[in-house]
Image: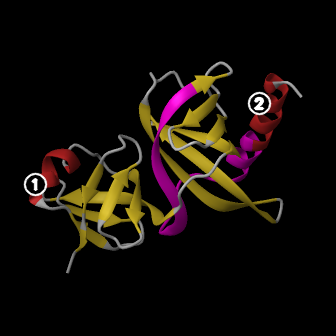
Amino acid sequence: MSISCARTAIGVLILGLFLATPVAAQTMEKVDFFVDSISEKGDLNHLVRLSGGSSWVLAEATLVAVPVDVLVVMRDVVVEGKRVAAAWVYVGGVEIPAKHLEGVYPKNAAFLTRVMASEDQGTKLRLADGSELLVPGYNKFISNRWTPPYKVLLSANRLSMHNLIDGRRVEVRPAK
């Protein structure tokens, strides 16, 4: 099977996953993730090899320059009544469905959610499940630029948060 045929077949699978499942987190969904960088691109910018050694095929091409940091989020979705592993690569402010081809990668537990509201110049955030987080004042120059609603990845220990659109990470703590 040629690379183009393989990319087409995987692209159809990824498109099916993309259409079958809303990517937007509604509350707090348990996911796995890792941060890496693209070290090589191929097949018209649809295939990427990450610095950690894993390779992925993207549902759409990425035109970002190499090397560039990426965040990969993995979760199980239900397609036609069956649980299927799915992944999304966040690169350059774009969310791209992806399929793992080869290589190993780390898995870090986290929660996929949304910030629904922001107060006090971005230092107090309300999440989709109603919980609130505080961003330390030294990070407000970052968080006060984010306009809700936006998707975030909250670490399993709830002490850090990645904005999935701009890729920035800030420390957080639960509001009391």
Read off the magenta span. Answer: 14-40
Q: How many marks?
A: 2
Q: Is mark 1 on a helix, strand or loop?
A: helix
Which comes sooner in the sequence, label 2 or label 1? 2
Residue drawn at (80%, 29%) of the image: 8
Asked whether residue 67 appears in the rendered view, the answer is yes
Whether 61 is drawn above or below 115: the answer is above
Q: Does the magenta stretch include residue 57?
A: no
The residue at which mark 1 appears reads as 138
Place of residue 100 in the rendered image (x, y in percent of width and height, measured from the top left)? 68, 45
Residue drawn at (58%, 46%) of the image: 88
Residue drawn at (54%, 42%) of the image: 89
Left or right of 117: which side holds 95?
A: right
Query: Within 10 angstroms of label 1, few (less than 14), some, or many (20 or more) residues?
Result: few
Q: Residue type at mark 1: give it.
A: Tyr
Query: Within 10 angstroms of label 2, few (less than 14), some, or many (20 or more) residues?
Result: some
- Outermost residue toward the bottom in this view: 176
Asked whether residue 92 appears in the rendered view, the answer is no
Place of residue 79 in the rendered image (x, y in percent of width and height, measured from the top left)? 78, 58
Image quarter where the C terminus lies is bottom left
